[in-house]
Amino acid sequence: MWGIVLKPVKVGICGLGTVGSGTFNILRNNAEEITRRVGRSIVVEQIGARQVNPTCDTTDINTTGDIFEVANNPDIDIVVELIGGTSVARELVLTAIENGKHVVTANKALIAEYGNEIFAKAQAKGVMVAFEAAVAGGIPIIKMLREGLSSNKIEWLAGIINGTGNFIMTEMSEKGRAFDDVLKEAQELGYAEADPTFDVEGIDAAHKLTILASIAYGIPLQFEKTYTEGISRITAEDVSFARELGYSIKHLGVARRTKAGVELRVHPTLISQKALLANVNGVMNAVMVKGDAVGPTLTYGAGAGAMPTGSSVVADIIDVARTLTADPTNRVPHLAFQPDQLSDAEILPMEEIECGFFLNMTIQDRAGVLANITQILSTNGISIESVIQREREGSDLVPLVVMTHDVKERNMNAAIAAIEALPDVAGSVQRIRVENLA
């Protein structure tokens, strides 16, 4: 093979927004280094975009406004899907695969919701679909799970996988600010969209967790079974009480293997202030993985942005280019496990999850109220770890915070319903789950 000059790998980029521009510029700026790594050059043959990004010099590139022209271009080896959304992106990716082209994408919603269909078609056509950039931006967590930890049984993983939510929780924790106030700033800074629902209600994180869990446990992608809860109901008071108890509140995606099945859940979570994840702040992302052989590991870095995410996209392009001539059966499987070896392990309903709880409620300041609440908890098999009760000047309503030991969610649901029905409890009970990430 020495002395043989391999022909360039030709790439078509669909979408030249934030991630597309980063991908294009990395391919251009690091072309020499990339060629040395791959053993052949990688060139951008065509770009499909509605408008040219001013940060990219595309004067010598064939550019079209029709992304399907890229998917149907016979000269292109790899189609890079960076348009976002799911409907058009799905059609584009399936068209590229049908034409025998490999695909690289940063689209977490596309993979989480349609990945099973896409991977099946890719396997039938003998092509690869790479999606490292779909989770945690520039952090190579998919490669770590799929390859670096392939000798391990993954016991659990927990991640801060949405930078917007982490920025909001950091500001609330460090400065005592209200959720609405921080969200407005996040929108002004460009961290949050005008409609922030996907970020603050956990949908974005749920897409990413779905992907990570499928790779960790060799199960089909099941986004619809991922429990999803956002941070919009978290108050500055919750954050203050949690800190007093030695905890931070983080918006986590958690996947855990149990004897009964697999837990898949995204929600606000109390974690010890000593935990590594508790110290991941601002817009940064981090994923902690516990393997049976390696123990706990942590990956940390930028979860979004042109260059960090573009870095992961280009790394996928390099991986595909390296294995273009490999027998498809010898490539790393999309979901880490051989397609015919995926497990049918049950995804546990939230009612079956077992963890500790932080309960924050407002009660009448009179004798016997606390006793009634503790009796309800005891009746439902819930033991108390600690209690905080405060006085409010000039009011007969006072805050009460209860921390519990681990209990099934079903029991806690019943207890909260009974507590909220008490005449001396005002409004609803705020419930935040507690995780021990030791």
Image: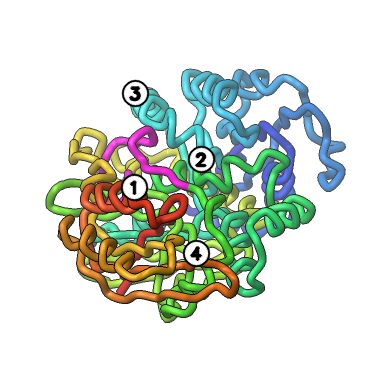
> Is residue 362 depicted above or below 196 in this figure?
below
Q: Compare residues 203 and 23 and report the one nearer the observer.
A: 203
Q: Compare residues 213 and 163 and report the one nearer the observer.
A: 163
Real-space CA distance between mark 2 and mark 4, rounded to the nearest whole angstrom: 45 Å
Q: Is residue 159 magenta?
A: no
Real-space CA distance between mark 4 and mark 1, rounded to the nearest whole angstrom: 16 Å
Q: Which residue is mark 2?
A: 108
Q: Position of residue 66 (x, y in %)?
A: 72, 19
Q: Which residue is mark 4?
A: 397
Assess whether mark 3 and mark 4 are in contact (beta carbons under 8 angstroms).
no
Whichever of labels 4 and 1 marks the residue nearer the N terminus, that label is 4
Which residue is found at the position 77% from the left and 56% from the top? 189
Name the amino acid, label 2.
Lys
Q: Which residue is mark 1?
A: 421
Whichever of labels 2 and 3 marks the residue nearer the N terminus, that label is 2
Residue 219 appears in the picture as rendered? yes
Q: Compare residues 287 and 364 and report the one nearer the observer.
A: 364
| Left or right relative to 52: residue 214 | left
Real-space CA distance between mark 1 and mark 3, rounded to the nearest whole angstrom: 57 Å
> Which SS class for mark 2?
helix
Q: Which residue is mark 3?
A: 124
The segment highlighted magenta reads 214-229
Indicate which label's residue lies in the foreground, 1 or 3.
1
Real-space CA distance between mark 1 and mark 2, rounded to the nearest whole angstrom: 41 Å
